[in-house]
Image: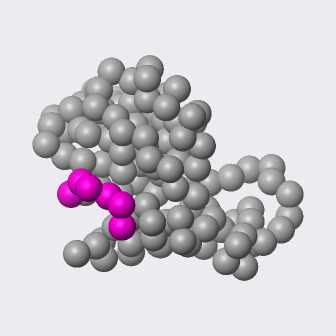
Amino acid sequence: MGGWTAADIGDQRGRTVIVTGASSGLGAETARVLATAGAKVIMACRNPDKAQAVADAIDGDTVVLDVDLADLASVRAFADGLSYDVDVLVNNAGVMAVPKGLTVDGFERRSSPAFTTPSHPSEAVLGRS
């Protein structure tokens, strides 16, 4: 039995997908594959310059937007500023090798983007009127 590959993704034209943490690693690859399949991909990243370099290398429709998932005000501003209807949200973002500390909202810095706050982009995007 063969394994699943990106070639198994169906036509994504007409869909808008947000990928958090799309400036490197799995998030960048997810953005690339979905954009190649025809989706409009919103690359939601805390480093827009780094994300734009990735977006420029993708053959497809990409938009880079700034959001810091460790800052709930940034997440709310991101969701409030969206001018797209969103079909899929890929909560991929995470951090590694950051010093121990707290976010501006009082969450532990290392676990916040990966474990504490992924629900916040979902709630913010889904709760838009």
Q: Is residue 34 magenta?
A: no
Report if residue 3 is visible in the image: no
Q: Main secondary structure of the magenta part?
A: loop
In this picture, is 119 found above or below 49? below
Q: Is residue 112 left or right of residue 8?
A: right
Q: Residue 75 placed where, x, y %? A: 49, 66
Report if residue 83 is visible in the image: yes
Q: Residue 29 placed where, x, y %? A: 46, 33
Q: Residue at x 57, y 34 (%)?
A: 49
In this picture, is 105 found above or below 2? below
Q: Is residue 10 left or right of residue 123?
A: left
Q: Residue at x 69, y 66 (%)?
A: 111
Q: Tell me which corner region of the image, top left, top right, bottom left or bottom right, holds residue 10.
A: top left
In this picture, is 19 found above or below 63? below
The quadrant of the picture occupied by the C terminus is bottom left
Q: Residue 44 placed where, x, y %? A: 46, 49
Q: Which contiguous range is marked in magenta?
A: 80-85
Q: Tell me which corner region of the image, top left, top right, bottom left or bottom right, holds residue 82.
A: bottom left
The quadrant of the picture occupied by the N terminus is top left
In this picture, is 120 found above or below 67? below
Q: Residue at x 52, y 36 (%)?
A: 51
Q: Residue 57 placed where, x, y %? A: 44, 20
